Image (cartoon, grey):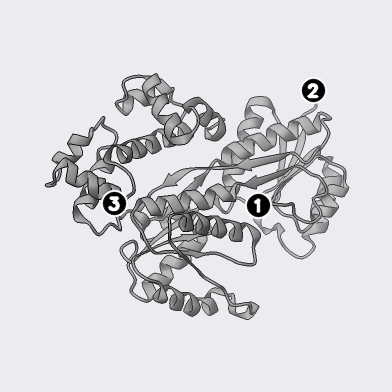
């Protein structure tokens, strides 16, 4: 009788990132298992939890571990069991991992895609709110600021009090509201996570700032529960986390079969921005350009042409083209293609529809047609993009 592997999962399910990791692991087990799982309930994080975890590893006869908690990582790794650690950062390794494989997030791309989302909406003022004592948050903010600087703008970065007594939400709230009040408006603001965005939204309400009219806010993780509980609903950078969970399970399977551990790293990459009301605005002062961009976004699922955009407004084609290039730095046609290709990218990442079906739904003439424009915008083919960012 074939032995069923026993796998311990030290991954919380209270937020979307953990749930998506678990979903990917479950998908792999369903296709290639079965595996038997042990997952600590939420209340395990109490006094003596390290001892409880180690006792469970020994007494249950576990074959492998995937964990997000690194406080006890040295003792876990010392058991000699194949272990994969979700470290939340794509630079360096947490203390004590000792060569174990890791799951990390591409924070360079996260910061860049958030900045580009706000730049595309015409913002000229930018801000970042995170936690400067946490490495992955710092990475996201730095890369956001670098992309904004490349476009010629400055990023205002929130600095929390160094005093631990000032870091509770009640104590921090007045500091955050003062900072928000001081920002030039309108401002496009990135936070390090969806939870942090929710705090910023609440702080804006306290001082009468409107979201997204005064402050447009984008988070990270695309935790649909948190994003839709926010008021207004929160735009967020979506990550290929379920895919990362699947790849982690795939790697753990090989490790449990005897493959050596050689610092393997699974990178979770951002796929797109799920746009909701918190950034659903155009910070473009020119009303003709703003109306034209809105027309493109509202009709991007149709095979619209430049003349369709011109006919929707009052300017001549030459006049509108000139304003597009001056304000957005690109032509009308380039904006149409960019918006349509972003829709293709989202469908490639979030669905298993054949590329031919995606082309048909978006009015492209053929797969070759869609592939040519996609490669020009994204630098890789639709098939390669789906392989990198799509569902397993």
Separation of residues labelled 1 and 3 (CA atoms): 38 Å
Quadrant including the N terminus: top right
**Closer to the eye: label 2 or 3:** 3
Residue at which label 3 appears: 326
| Residue drawn 21% across the image and 49% down it | 291
Q: From where the camera sits, is residue 222 visible?
A: no
Q: Which numbered disc flags the more N-terminal residue, 1 or 2? A: 2
Cα distance, mark 1 to mark 2? 37 Å
Q: Quadrant of the C terminus?
A: top right
Q: Residue at x 56, y 59 (%)?
A: 142
Quarter holding residue 335: top left
Residue labelled with disc 1? 89
- Residue 325 in the image: x percent, y percent? 29, 47
Query: For numbered disc 3, what is the local secondary structure?
Result: helix
Measured in 3D between alpha carbons, the distance from the residue under mark 2 to the one under mark 3, in whole angstroms, is 67 Å
Q: Is residue 255 visible?
A: yes
Q: Is residue 8 left or right of residue 171?
A: right
State the residue lying farthest toward the left: 314
Q: Quadrant of residue 122?
A: bottom left
* Callout 3 crowding tier (Cα within 10 Å): few <14, some 14–19, many ≥20: few
- Secondary-structure class at tag 1: loop
At horizontal 44% and vertical 76% (from top left) the residue drawn is 177
Residue 36: x %, y % from top left: 72, 35
Q: Nearer the viewer, residue 158 or 209?
A: 158
* Total numbered badges shown on the rendered structure: 3
Question: Considering only vertical position in the picture, is 254 above or below 121?
Answer: above
Residue at image x 26%, y 31%?
A: 302
Residue that mark 2 sits on: 2
- Residue 209 in the image: state x and y as whole percent: 34, 71
Residues packed near mark 2 inside 10 Å, few (<14), some (14 to 19) or many (20 plus): few
């Amino acid at each position: 009788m074939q032995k069923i592997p026993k796998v311990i999962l030290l991954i919380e399910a209270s937020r979307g990132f953990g749930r998506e990791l678990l979903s990917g692991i479950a998908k792999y087990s369903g296709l290639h298992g079965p595996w038997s799982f042990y997952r600590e309930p939420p209340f395990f994080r109490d006094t003596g939890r390290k001892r409880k975890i180690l006792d469970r590893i020994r007494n249950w006869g576990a074959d492998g571990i995937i964990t997000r908690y690194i406080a006890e990582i040295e003792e876990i790794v010392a058991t000699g069991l194949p272990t994969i650690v979700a470290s939340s950062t794509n630079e360096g390794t947490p203390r004590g991992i000792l060569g174990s494989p890791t799951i990390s997030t591409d924070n360079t791309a996260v910061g860049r895609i958030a900045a580009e989302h706000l730049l595309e909406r015409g913002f000229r003022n930018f801000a970042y709110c995170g936690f400067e004592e946490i490495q992955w948050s710092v990475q996201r903010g730095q890369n956001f600021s670098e992309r904004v600087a490349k476009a010629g703008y400055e990023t205002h970065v929130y600095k929390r009090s160094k005093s631990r007594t000032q870091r509770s939400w009640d104590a921090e709230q007045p500091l955050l509201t003062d900072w928000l009040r001081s920002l030039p408006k309108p401002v496009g603001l990135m936070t390090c996570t969806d939870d942090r965005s929710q705090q910023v939204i609440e702080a804006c309400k306290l001082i009468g700032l409107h979201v997204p009219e005064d402050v447009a806010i984008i988070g990270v993780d695309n935790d649909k529960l948190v994003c839709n509980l926010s008021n207004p609903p929160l735009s967020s950078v979506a990550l290929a986390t379920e895919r990362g969970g699947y790849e982690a399970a795939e790697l753990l399977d090989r490790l449990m079969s005897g493959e050596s551990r050689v610092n393997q790293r699974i990178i979770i990459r951002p796929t797109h921005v799920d746009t909701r009301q918190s950034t659903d605005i155009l910070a473009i002062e020119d009303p003709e350009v703003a109306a034209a961009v809105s027309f493109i976004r509202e009709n991007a699922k149709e095979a619209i042409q430049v003349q369709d955009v011109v006919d929707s407004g009052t300017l001549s084609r030459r006049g509108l083209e000139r304003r597009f290039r001056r304000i957005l730095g690109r032509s009308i046609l380039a904006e149409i293609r960019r918006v349509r290709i972003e829709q293709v990218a989202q469908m490639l990442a979030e669905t298993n529809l054949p590329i031919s079906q995606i082309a048909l739904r978006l009015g492209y003439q053929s797969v070759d047609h869609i592939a040519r424009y996609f490669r020009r915008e994204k630098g890789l083919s639709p098939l390669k993009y789906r392989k990198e960012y799509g569902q397993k």
